[in-house]
Amino acid sequence: MPSKYSAVLALGVSFLTLTMDSSANATSINVAVAANFAGTLSDIKSAFESDYPGDTFVITSASSGVITTAITSGNSPGYDLFLSADTSYPATVASAGWATGTPFTYAKGEILLWSSTNAGSSLNVSAGLESLVSGSFPHSLVIADPSKAPYGVAASTVLSQSPWSISSGSLPCCNVSFATNIDNTYTAVANGTNKQGFIAKSKVCRYDASTNTYTFNATGNTYSYKEYPYNDTTHPYSQIVQNAVGVVNSSRTSAQDTVLANLISYLTGSTAQGYITQYCYILP
């Protein structure tokens, strides 16, 4: 006759097996996301999987331009959904015949100037970007590559205005360097490679809805910053409107189609929008 211990052990093993089977049997899709939104999407993913226990997705992060090239060149990575940092790249995917459904806006972002004093820089950027000296910035500045990253386009637009008047075609120059995506601009400043950089506001800003307050922080860093809203009267740039679009994937199953539809609906729902505002994005 089995002991009570054996019965409990058997129950535990059965529960473990059920849990593992449930995880193994989850239906997964592939989501490509612009680097600025990767952290936000990771939080949304946890909530989505809690609300849809049988659904999951794998996140791949890169610049919007790199993702678009991968999709329109045959979609060999097998992406099912593309979350861009602008409207033009999803439109390119659609015009090339690689979109399912219509692109939709999920968030709007902004840039800010950032300097990390923990990386050995004494530069304080709270008054804004410094002036050129003999045609160059005294302290190295990093922006995302404008040819691949919409946040880099916003930064280059600011630089093209007075008093700097650096044409986008002349970049990189003048002690300005490019990072491959907007996430890497933050890294370059945080590790001291560059003294200052235009980064995504969402990287360091958090909004607390309960107190209606914004805080700016970065783990392990002391810092200074200057916000550059898109509608700034002195240095405006086109608002960073971020669109998403479903992607043609010939290997996608009907079950995966359901996950894709659920996720698209979820991104425009109240739970996801709560995370989006928490990361200081503007809602559509």
Image: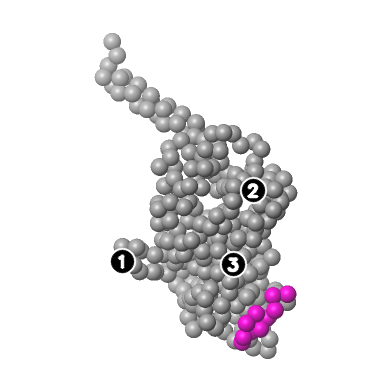
Cα–Cα gap, marks 1 and 2: 40 Å
Q: In x, y percent, where is residue 145? A: 66, 66
Amino acid residing under circle 2: Ala
Q: Is residue 5 left or right of residue 112?
A: left
Where residue 100 appears, as percent x and y from the top left, is: 62, 46
Q: CA distance from mark 1 to mark 3?
A: 29 Å
Marks 2,3: beta carbons within 8 A: no
Q: Element type at marker 1?
A: loop
Image check: 97 left or right of 12?
right
Tag 2, which secondary structure? strand
Quarter of the rendering containing residue 255: top right
**The one of 71 and 203 positioned closer to us in this rendering:** 71
Rendered residue at 69%/75% (across/down): 168
Q: Amino acid at mark 1?
A: Thr
Magenta stretch: give its range: 160-169
Residue at label 3? 151
Q: Position of residue 127 (x, y in %)?
A: 49, 84
Image coordinates of residue 111 in percent, x first then y, are 53, 70
Q: Is residue 92 left or right of residue 125?
A: right
**Residue at label 1?**
211
Of label 1 and label 2, which has the lower sequence position? 2
Can the viewer see residue 179?
Answer: no
Choose the circle earlier in sequence order: 2 or 3: 2
Figure check: 141 above or below 83:
below
- Say if mark 1 contacts mark 2, CB within 8 Å: no
**Does the magenta run of residues contain 163?**
yes
- What residue did someone put label 2 on? 99
Kindly give the residue lying farthest to the bottom in the view shown.
134
Other-residue count near label 3 (Cα within 10 Å), few / some / many at <14 / 14–19 / ≥20: many
**Front tag of 2 and 3:** 2
